[in-house]
Image (cartoon, grey):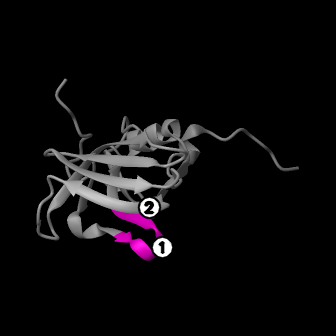
Amino acid sequence: MTETRDATFEEGAARPLRLRALDGEDLQVISALVQDSVLPASEMAWKKSDRRFGMLVNRFRWEDPATTREAERVQAVLCIENVTAVRSQGLGERDADTVLSLLAMVFEPGEDAAGTVRMILAGDGEIAVEVEALEVILRDVTRPYSAPSGKAPKHPE
């Protein structure tokens, strides 16, 4: 006879995230999970023919508080579908190795299902992605690794 037991939270902690936002409330969850993600400017692209904007980010694992071990990050793909236009502000002509820090994502609805996904970056930068309908996907693509600083990011209160 095989013994059965309930799963523990710890057993699910290292599983990769795969989330989809289809409305503003869903996007708030993804925004919280990608807060303080960092990426080189070269790791974002708009595929106009596919109507997709994507970023490969190194996100802090907010969903797994580091209480008994070091703080962790994981590489994740952040993808916005149904894209009609992409604009940026405050980025200028930066070197491809310039490191960007993503602070938040918000959805500003427009007519029908259309709207704008705004990605607020540290240093007053912003990327605005116009969409016909909101669909944002966050998918972890590597195993977690120790955050180089060994600490969780902090913000002034």
Which residue is label 2 attached to? 83
Residue 62, percent from left and from top = 39, 40
Foreground of the two, 34 or 126: 126
Compared with 13, 51 (above or below) is below
Quarter of the C terminus within the rendering: top left
In the orientation shown, which residue stands out farthest toward the front?
111
Is residue 42 toward the left or the right of residue 92 in the image?
right
Q: What secondary structure characterizes most of the magenta part? A: strand
In the rendered structure, which disc, 1 or 2, sits on the residue that comes first in sequence?
1
Q: CA distance from mark 1 to mark 2?
A: 8 Å
Which residue is label 1 attached to? 50
Q: Do we see residue 63 in this rendering?
A: no
Q: Secondary structure at mark 2?
A: strand
Start-end of magenta stretch: 46-56
Residue 66, percent from left and from top = 36, 39
Amino acid marked by disc 2 = Val
Q: Secondary structure at mark 1?
A: helix
Can residue 48 be found in the magenta stretch? yes
